[in-house]
Amino acid sequence: MLGLARSVARAQPRLASTFAVQSSSVHTLPKLDYAYDALEPHISGEIMNLHHTKHHQTYVNGLNAAEEAYAKAETPKDRIKLQAALKFNGGGHINHSLFWKNLAPTSQGGGNLSDGPLKAAIERDFGSFEKLKEQMNATTAAIQGSGWGWLGFNQATKKLEIVTTANQDPLLSHVPIIGIDIWEHAFYLQYKNVKPDYLKAIWNVVNFKEAEKRLVEATK
């Protein structure tokens, strides 16, 4: 788990300090900055409640249990057996902690991409915001099974790029700027099996101010 924490520190600077503190203590479910129904009609309050209090809480519980077992493991073989649980639950906790910050009600600026470094970078690397949405929605919708679609900053090329991760794998190759959860629990109660409708709707509540902060920090 410590290796995962170091990788997160490199790829996700805003989360690194929090994760470093938590890695030696008990992980807890982060509070949301808005009410569960604040993202309606784009994401229902029922989905947000279940997603946060049930699914994310399950990853937190699983991560705490896996880390406790890892600390008690007496042999390398026992510790190796725990790697899958640490990766899955640790990734679930990392990804969802980023995801909640990634969203904002329209009354708090959600969905509003204003002029600034993020908009300029999107237009530079994709041509327009509309082209970014089209490409990212298509790439994310094509994920087979469960996973995440990401707008990430490649620190080698200094460009924004669209990438995906499977299951709850955290994004380590890029700095995450915007992440979209494509697990069914993120949309099925409202959008059923029509993933494109969910992907189209979520842009109305993306917290572009938070995304821009991540980009600015990544480019320092």
Image (cartoon, helix red, strand yellow):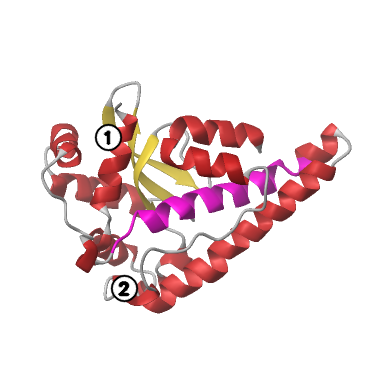
Under circle 2, the secondary element is helix
Determine whether the residue tagged by mark 1 lies in a helix, strand or loop.
helix
Image-based side of 107 in relation to 52, left or right: left
Q: Which residue is drawn at 27% across and 71% down?
A: 42
How far is disc 2 from disc 1 in space, using C-alphas? Answer: 27 Å
From what the image shows, is residue 113 above or below residue 176? below
| Rendering coords of residue 189 (x, y %) | 42, 76
Q: In the rendered image, is residue 181 in sight?
A: no
Residue sitting at the far top: 156
Residue 163 placement (x, y as % from top left):
37, 39
Which label was assigned to residue 38? 2
Residue 49 marker: none
Query: Is 183 situated left or right of 217 in this image?
Result: right
Within-10-Å neighbours for mark 1: few <14, some 14–19, many 20+: few
Specify whether residue 40 is in view.
yes
108 horizontally vs 1: left or right: left
Q: In which quarter of the image is residue 14?
A: top left
Q: Give the range drawn in magenta.
A: 81-104
Mark earlier in primary sequence (2, 1): 2
Question: What numbered label is drawn on residue 216?
Answer: 1
Quadrant, the C terminus: top left
Residue 204, by quadrant, is bottom left
User: Where the N terminus falls, by quadrant?
Assistant: top right
| Amino acid type for the residue under numbered disc 2 | Ala
Locate residue 215 relative to residue 15 in the image: left or right. left
Up/down of 163 relative to 96, above or below: above
Residue drawn at (55%, 52%) of the image: 93
* Residue 144 covered by magenta stretch: no
